[in-house]
Image (tube, rainbow, N blue to C red):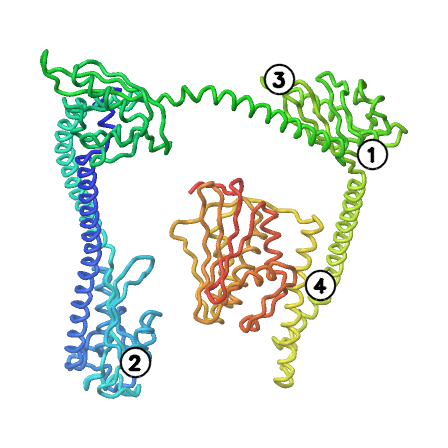
Amino acid sequence: MSPALRYALFEPSLIRRYAALSVFALSVLIIISALWNLNNLKDQAVNLATAEAASNWNKDLSFRKWATRHGGLYVKPNDRTPPNPYLEHLKDRDVVTTDGTRLTLMNPAYMMRQMTEEFEEFYGIKGSITGQILLNPINEPDHWELRALKLFDLGTTEIIEQSVIDGAPYLRLMRPMVMEEGCEKCHGHLGFKVGDIRGGISVSIPLTPYFEAAKATENTMLASHGGVWLAGIFVIGFVSIRGRQHEREFFTAEQKYRTLIEATSAVVWTTDPKGEFSTRQQSWENYTGQTWPEHQGSGWTDMIHPDDVEKIRRNWNNAIGSRSTYTDEGRIWSAEANSYRDFITRAAPVFIDRNTVSEWIGTITDTTARKQAEQALHKARDELEARVIERTKELRKLSLAVEQSPDMVFITDIQGTIQYVNPKFSEMTGFSRDEAVGSNPRMLKSGDTADAVYKDLWQTISAGNEWRGDIKDKRKDGSTYWASMLVAPVKDEDGKVTDYVAMHEDITERRRVEQNVRDAMKKAEHADRAKSELLANMSHELRTPLNAIIGFSDTLIAETFGPMANDKQREYLQDIHFSGEHLLDLINDVLDVSAIEAGKTELNESELELMSTFDDCLKLVSSRAMQGGIKINCDQKNGFPRLFADERRTKQIVINLLTNAIKFTPEGGEVTLNAVQNDDQSMTLTVTDTGIGMDAAGIKKAMTQFGQVDSSLDRKFEGTGLGLPLTRMLVELHGGELLIESEPGHGTTVFVNFPPERVISPR
């Protein structure tokens, strides 16, 4: 690599630093500008929509006031404008002209409703007049409008918010509507007086056109910022390249001299013609630690050993006087060694012409290492002898450790002939050291260990690897024992296997205990299976009388055979009917759990359209959700993948999760059902609620059979404590996984993961 190239790549440069800082500053400014402008685009879009909403609201209010001042408008009735049944209390609602034409009164609210409907049809802008006390129920407020009306009662004069209507973003504006004198004719009978807030007028502006316009402007803005950034980078790069060319030229010249100096380990120095340091000697300073003010002139002599100063000074002056080559020896101070070191110095004059010396150039070579070489050799010999002694001690310790090891140890050559056994070998096998050495480990084979095990052992250690396993050995007296065996190869410096070392640990007692544990587990599994079968049989026998109780109580409640004698009888029958259904649900859950645990549940699998499955499940739980004042969401805008599963069991999973979520969600809360396909083609079904939530202990308890989380809310619905455990079993039958994330006071999310092989269609 040339010096210029190495400099360009690795040497620090002010120009490069300034260029990097300039690029960084330019990039930061471009990013800040782009972010600021992008943020303003969105704000401008919302501000424009707000202005349009205010304009439409003012238009609606002006039209309403005009209609109010004129007392409404008489029109010919037709299918679109029939007589208003909510104005029947007005005597002059319907009139007949002198020519016999029948006319009906359109009050301001009636006119406004028709106008906003047609305006929405033509321009997409929604509008409505609504209130908490209504003349016409068709003007009933939605959830957002009802919240705004309640805020008007508290003194709020305007509500502006972004919201989603039918899956599209809207800007919604609502202001209160005050009773005026002309309003009493139609609404006075509802109890309103002039000056009361009768309701509100709302306008909803679609934001999609504004966001699309902002997006188009955003792309143009990003492109322009990118162009400015690239132009700036080009200018900075051009200026820095020209600057670097001048730096390289200077660096190349300097590098030649620097390379010459760095190529030697000697101290390089220069003096003026008088033999004094007239410029800073960096090499001298690095070696001696003497600073430039200290070694300036003849200060360098302070670094020479006091016993050598006079001799060196005399020889140096003689060389200067004769303008001849200078060579000398002595001792000089080394900052690194923090001591005086032996050296040899050589110098030669540099002539401008034949008789004029411009400077002296010399070197100092440290010769201490050469003199210390013999000392190092003697020291190395002594250290080697000490290491041999220490190694002998370590080998002795290792020998004692093997000899006294509680495990049986023996060593063989590569043919398997035993060369060494420790005392534990004789204790465990009954073979003496003399009997074992020279023999083959085959004498320990009991015949109960498969030949494949020994074949695998020899293949493994022959390849230079360790082998571990359990084998059954035989003692000299013919008795057997189980041993945990480790065989490892011993390799020389070249990695060649020279011997094998084996260790045997007697694990007979451990094997006996493990077998007892396995036997106990089999008995426990058999008892558990018997329990499940008993529960299934008992539950089946209980369902027949329960069905009769539920059926007869239902018939009596319906008064099929005649009316009830009194309300108390109806109350008791309803309690009997509810208790019977609750017990039947419990028995059904017990039957399902028992069937799964007994391994008798089979899946009737087919391709499922999840959207249809979700609709069926939502219909079944919607009434309970409505009773509890809970909103159920199901995001279907992207559709759902098809699933290969048991349809009845899949519905059971979804219904159990939705029912549980509704059960533990307070009034006004929400439950959301969704399903997404993951990157690995698996599918995750989620049920999220805004309910009471659970801590880690509650989750663990809820996942156990008959475990219920104690809460004030769950007293609205009784449970069996089997819902979540049964759901998890059904998910696992499909090869899936059920997970719960929850936090007290922040709701719960249940994740049901189906494996990729059960997902039919890609995203």
Give how far apart the Cα atoms at labels 3 and 4 are: 76 Å
Q: What residue type is labelled 4?
A: Arg
Q: Which secondary structure, mark 3?
A: loop
Q: Which secondary structure, mark 1?
A: strand
Mark 1 or 3, which is nearer the eye? Answer: 3
Name the disc covering residue 154, or none.
2
**Mark 4, residue position:** 543
Q: Which amino acid does label 3 sit on?
A: Lys
Splitting the image into 4 quarters, where does residue 351 fall? top left
Q: Which secondary structure, mark 4?
A: helix
**Mark 1, residue position:** 481
What residue is shown at x 28% (from left), y 63% (from top)?
A: 162
> Looking at the image, is mark 2 or mark 4 earlier in the sequence?
2
What residue is shown at x 16% (from left), y 15% (from top)?
A: 323
Mark 3 or 2, which is nearer the eye? Answer: 3
Give how far apart the Cα atoms at labels 1 and 3 are: 33 Å
Q: Pointers 1 and 4 in contact (CB under 8 A)?
A: no
Question: Residue 204's x, y, as percent?
Answer: 25, 65
